[in-house]
Amino acid sequence: MNRAPASSLPSEDLLRAGIGEAHVAGRRARARARNLAGYVFIGPWLIGFFGLTLLPMAVSLYLAFTDYDILTAPRWVGLENFHRMFMQDRRYLQSVTVTLFYVAVAVPLRLVFALGLAMLLNTNRRGVSVYRAAYYAPSIVAGSVAVALMWRQVFGTQGVVNAVLAILGVPRVSWLGDPDFAIWTLITLAVWQFGSPMLIFLAGLRQIPVELYEAAAIDGAGAWARFFRITLPLLSPVTFFNLVMQTITGFMVFTQAFIVTGGGPMDTTLFYALYLYRRAFESFQMGYASAMAWVLLLAVALCTAVLFKTSGRWVFYEAKEGR
Amino acid sequence: MRGHVSRMIAGTLAWMTVIAGLGLAGAVHTPAAAQSGGSGAAPVELRVAWWGSQDRHNRTIKAIELFQKKYPNIKVTYEFAGWGDYWTKMTTQAAGRNLPDVMQQDYAYITEWSSRGLLASLDDYVKAGILDMRDVADAAIKGGVVNGKLVAVNLGSNSQCWVLDLDAFKKAGVELPPPNWTWGDFEKTAMALHQKLGISGMGSGVWNNQIWGALYLSAGQWRYTADGSRIGYESDKPLVDHFNMLLRLQKANALTSRADELASYNQETSVELAPIVSRKAGMAYFWSNQIVAVWKAGGGDERNFVLHPLPRVAGGKSANYLKPSQFFSVTSQAKQPKEAAMFIDFFTNSIEANEVLLAERGVPISSKVQQALKPKLGRSQAEMFAYLDRVTKDVQPIPPPDPPGHTDIVKNVFDPQVIDPVAYGRLEPEKGAALLRQEANAILAKAKR
């Protein structure tokens, strides 16, 4: 960007006779210095990007086609890792099923919850900011080990949930040990961590002009009609953003299962990322794990692409329509 | 404007200097450390790594301080981690040719690491007297010998055990089983404890893959063939019978259910959460050195535990063997191999050091150290020493180290695809045992390639 004006300057300068070359050189130097400053500032990021992102990605792409246990050199095996993944590894298919189920259930639930809370908190009553902060708090510590450990206690055999159920006369349930329940404790945890989509929804809600609601109310629209005819359509870009972001994080869920259930019982909470980690850092099958990582990347990319493709049908951009 | 530019350049230079400085610092450091090997008085830096609990970290660090006091020219830098992270870390360091001088090793890994040339032979140091093994019984050394070379020094002897809660047995009026008890006796004992006290007769650990090994060891076989290329037994029946017995106990509530075990106790490290600790079970399976943690978590002196050998199959041999709980090895990438050997010698023979370590890694291998420690032991350590004395009278030779595919088999087949489904009643024991054989053979064949 800086180059263009710098190179066009000399001709102008030559027209204005009498102005010395020193001036031109000065400008050039200044432009160069500006460029240099730019590079210096993004330097750390560039180093990080090439050294810590691009290079490892390239290496992992190569490793995906090898058998590599870290201690001995990688051995080229072609497509064997992928063949094993889809044709032989039952646990892999289990992890795919579990992850898809989790994304399909936890993400919509979390969004519904986030939107509901955002609407409740979208008032100007006194003290509402305290509630906003309180409801956002679980998300600040969202992926954290501390919350997961607490969840383990809450749903443990001797945990709070069972204690409350006992008072109600419901028999004790092994929430984390029962293959039918374990995944639901993690989904509950995910729904509870609705803070960041809630904040984004809240910001979106505050953008909707109040006049629209007033006009609709005068025309006799009820609360439901206002919600479905005004709030949802006008909020759809925000919803779309939240949906994409939450879907992507949903596919990458790891910490919760790693700590709360360890992937068990019977692999019913064996999320994709957890299984990948196990293969890479417990079984030291780096080649296989790399192959898994690339399949995940492609799957998430595909999923996001599908969301974008279908978004035209339900996402309403005010600016575009108003043109 | 000019000032602005020069400031910019100055800033850039400063930034580059920092980077260059970092690089230089790294460059200067390494040769300095490498040069000083060999001669006794020159300052030497020694790197040591181990895995373990917080208790072990504290004790080991104290012992390291004693070592530095004895050899003021040696500065020990150390790193430690939990079991899983430790191996991730060491494997990565091995790939980066950056292994520490001394690393803790495990019986399951020494063959693999040694065959890849990552562990140095210690025989020369033993011959030279730097590593003094004169007070160590041959049986305690043997576990660290791979292909005729000593590559690892045992830090403590261990054996598997049944921990029995004496108070529970007394209260229930159930007699202690004889040392050569069978799985049938075990079933009756567990049922009796449950019927009299309402607690689980057996708490945690009985689904552990070690029991799978113990079953076949007791039947005079082993779970893998000697060359580790496939499953080593012909008949699945002992395993199937065993599963059926556990399912009977679980159904009768005489065994802590698999669901409860996983829900409260799915991390191998959390000994504190085992049902026997909170008096919810009368028996539990552990490695003998773990009794120290169990006893402490259970309330210390108010509790009374006794360690008992593993049950046998009917008419079978002892299911116990002495296992080196862990080793110290000198790595082939060590910069200070001689000082590393001196360090291991200190852990093996120094009474002062072992008074700090206090058999936390198992019963020390030097007979002199054992004698010196005996009067200083707490009740849990004393029971561990006494148990090893008792069990040594009837043990089998240690089975060969597990083949490279073993971890894969346990983590990806045995626990998730066999034990869990069988324990939850969603897979018939026969099918579970057959699946284990099929999948294990496939993994072993692949690992052998």
Image: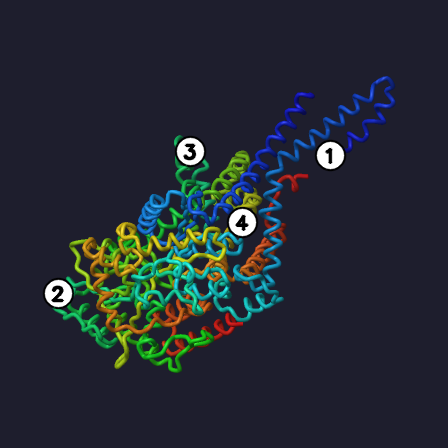
Query: Are dots 4 and 2 in contact, CB under 8 Å?
Result: no
In which chain is the residue bearing label 1?
A: A
SS at mark 3? helix
- Using the image as rendered, state which of residue B278 and residue A314 is in the foreground: B278
Horizontal and vertical percent position of residue B382: 20, 59
Looking at the image, residue B363 sits to the left or right of residue A50; the answer is left
**Residue position for label 1:** A1
**Residue position for label 4:** A243
Q: Earlier in the sequence, mark 4 or mark 3?
A: 3
Q: Residue at position x 25%, y 75% from top?
A: B183
Disc 1 packing (10 Å; few <14; some 14–19; many ≥20): few
- Using the image as rendered, state which of residue B94 and residue B10 is in the foreground: B94
Q: Earlier in the sequence, mark 4 or mark 1?
A: 1
Q: Type of residue at label 2?
A: Lys
**Residue position for label 2:** B170
Q: Residue at position x 73%, y 34% from top?
A: A1
Tell me, yes or no, if residue A257 can be seen here: no
Q: Type of residue at label 1?
A: Met
Looking at the image, residue B341 sits to the left or right of residue A321; the answer is left
Q: Type of residue at label 3?
A: Ser
Horizontal and vertical percent position of residue A292: 55, 60
